Image (cartoon, rainbow, N blue to C red):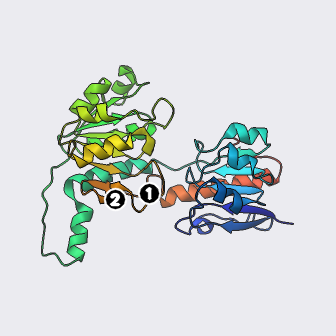
Amino acid sequence: MAVRCAILDDYQNVVLKVADWSKVKSDVDFKVFNEHLGGPDKVIAALKGFQIVVAMRERTGFPRQVIEALPDLKLLITTGMRNASIDTEAAKERGVTVCGTGSFGSPTSGIAIGLMLELTRHIGYENARMHAGATWQSTIGPDLEGMTLGILGLGKLGTRTANIAKAFGMKVIAWSQNLTAEKAQEAGVGYVGKDDLFRQSDFITIHVVLSQRTRGIIGAAELGLMKPTAFLINTSRGPIVDEAALLAALRDKRIAGAGLDTFDVEPLPVDHPLRKLDNVVLTPHLGYVSEQNYKHYFAGVVEDIRGFLDGKPVRVMT
């Protein structure tokens, strides 16, 4: 009998097209979920009887409550090698193998820069006007050249974003809890303290991992240090920024605006107040959603399934 495998959150209905599944097709019965399942109770109800579950990043969470309610689950795969929404300790206790995949490039950096360009040069806005029949241009925006980009977190993604920003002629500064002056110098980036990062920057872009140390690290105090002409970019995780404080700063025009690709609750509720603000550019967590990355992810998923079926699991996280 074929093993049952659920593939979750395939919003674009592309997963079975971006990889070669022939290596496992004869051994596995796949069910693809194109819509988000919702909260834990709905996840449990939908996934009963599946031995393998493939999670797309952190779209669907697997806390202890969910893992313990799925007695048939034997293999849980996440795209990428880090997933804070999976309780790996609970999985280990229940004998569930958790595997990850590789990834491709740094697509999030392109989204971060794209949000900056939209906030300043209004490309998407003017495109919509042209298609709607507008005669010609209606906006005027500043060039990125000469602006100061403040990077919160100078790891792989932060460094990649810094290099792109420098190509635009931006001055780049950085701070994080672990960053040293030496590491910043190696990256060709100015090292500043946390307060100066927020005071000096025309853009703040977030490239730290969500953890207990970084949750809410940008709150009312930090937003209050920003220039009224400055913008906040978040392509990392929503809870790194205090959402209530950000909403207040945007409504009161204490900062010029924000470009947001990640949110506290995803998918973003249709009645969420962020959707009603005219100084915010919103994208639906596109940071890792590129053709190359998807191909890399799901080729890895096939390898993970084949390895598990053969008793030789690969890229094991628990």
Q: Quadrant of the N terminus?
A: bottom right
- The residue sitting at 36% across, 43% down in the picture is 244
Identity of the residue furthest to the right in this view: 1
- The residue sitting at 56% across, 68% down in the picture is 14
- The residue sitting at 77% across, 63% down in the picture is 4
Q: Is residue 164 visible?
A: no
Counting from the top left corner in percent of width and height, residue 129 is at 21, 71
Q: Is residue 152 left or right of residue 25?
A: left
Give above or below for 175 relative to 158.
above
Counting from the top left corner in percent of width and height, residue 19 is at 62, 63
Counting from the top left corner in percent of width and height, residue 180 is at 39, 21
What residue type is disc 1 on?
Leu
Give residue 173's quadrant in the image.
Answer: top left
Q: Is residue 63 left or right of residue 161?
A: right
Q: Quadrant of the C terminus?
A: top right
Give above or below for 35 relative to 259.
below
Give above or below for 32 relative to 79.
below
Q: Secondary structure at mark 2?
A: helix
Which label is found at residue 127?
Answer: none
Give residue 151's quadrant in the image.
Answer: top left
Residue that carries the numbered disc 1 in the rendered image: 268
Q: Secondary structure at mark 1?
A: loop
Residue that carries the numbered disc 2 in the rendered image: 275
Of 12 and 49, the residue lying toward us: 49
Of 47 and 142, the residue lying toward us: 47
Tell me whether circle 1 and circle 2 mark residues in contact (CB < 8 Å): yes
First in sequence, mark 1 or 2: give its number: 1
